[in-house]
């Protein structure tokens, strides 16, 4: 199964007083991974956003099964779970070496800004097309 990958090096700033990564950083990295996907695979989304497209995080989750510390390298793998109407759901897996340290999900809604309000809109075809390469096998 093909996955989009983002490699991150943990910094001191991302750790707590105990020395492990503070839990909210995992969710932050989901957004960073998603943004790297958009930058690398669908850079035209920036023009669409300037023209009123809005990507809104509708929900996210993360389950932790291991710990990360400063200077650990963590590979964040992203997969497409589903597309429905104006939303898509992504899965994330966090690896230190071969070991999974966390898993999460991220649901994104696509909207158009009109008259200071958000209105549901279709997901641009170029995003659907690129994400299709990373679909989880059923």
Image: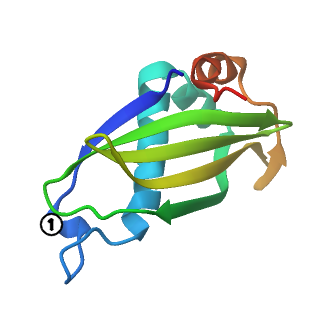
Q: Residues within 10 Å of mark 1 (few under 14, many from 20)?
A: few
The quarter holding residue 86 reads top right
Q: Residue at x 65, y 17 (%)?
A: 126
Looking at the rendered structure, the secondary structure element under dot 1 is: helix
**81 on left or right of 39:** right
Which percent across, then down, holds residue 43? Answer: 48, 23
Q: How is the image coloured?
A: rainbow
Q: Please identify the quadrant where the N terminus is shown.
A: top right
Where 19 falls versus 116 (above or below)? Answer: below
Q: Residue at x 84, y 47 (%)?
A: 119
Q: Determine which residue is flagged by label 1.
A: 12
The quarter holding residue 121 reads top right
Say which of 81 and 111 sits in front.
81
The quarter holding residue 95 reads top left
Q: Is residue 115 visible?
A: no
**128 on left or right of 83:** left
Which percent across, then down, holds residue 101? Answer: 37, 55
Say which of 109 and 1 sits in front.
1
Q: Is residue 60 visible?
A: yes
**102 on left or right of 45:** left
Say which of 29 and 127 sits in front.
29
């Amino acid at each position: 199964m093909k996955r989009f990958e983002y490699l991150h090096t943990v910094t001191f700033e991302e750790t707590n007083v105990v020395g492990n990564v503070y839990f909210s950083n995992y969710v932050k990295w989901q957004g960073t991974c998603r943004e790297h996907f958009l930058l690398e695979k669908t850079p035209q989304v920036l023009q669409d956003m300037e023209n009123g497209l809005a990507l809104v995080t509708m929900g996210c989750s993360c389950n932790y099964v291991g710990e990360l510390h400063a200077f650990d390298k963590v590979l964040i793998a992203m997969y497409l779970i589903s597309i429905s109407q104006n939303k898509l759901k992504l899965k994330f897996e966090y690896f230190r070496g071969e070991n999974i340290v966390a898993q999460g999900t991220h649901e994104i809604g696509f909207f158009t800004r009109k008259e200071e309000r958000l209105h549901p809109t279709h997901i641009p075809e170029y995003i659907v097309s690129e994400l299709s390469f990373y679909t989880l096998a059923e």
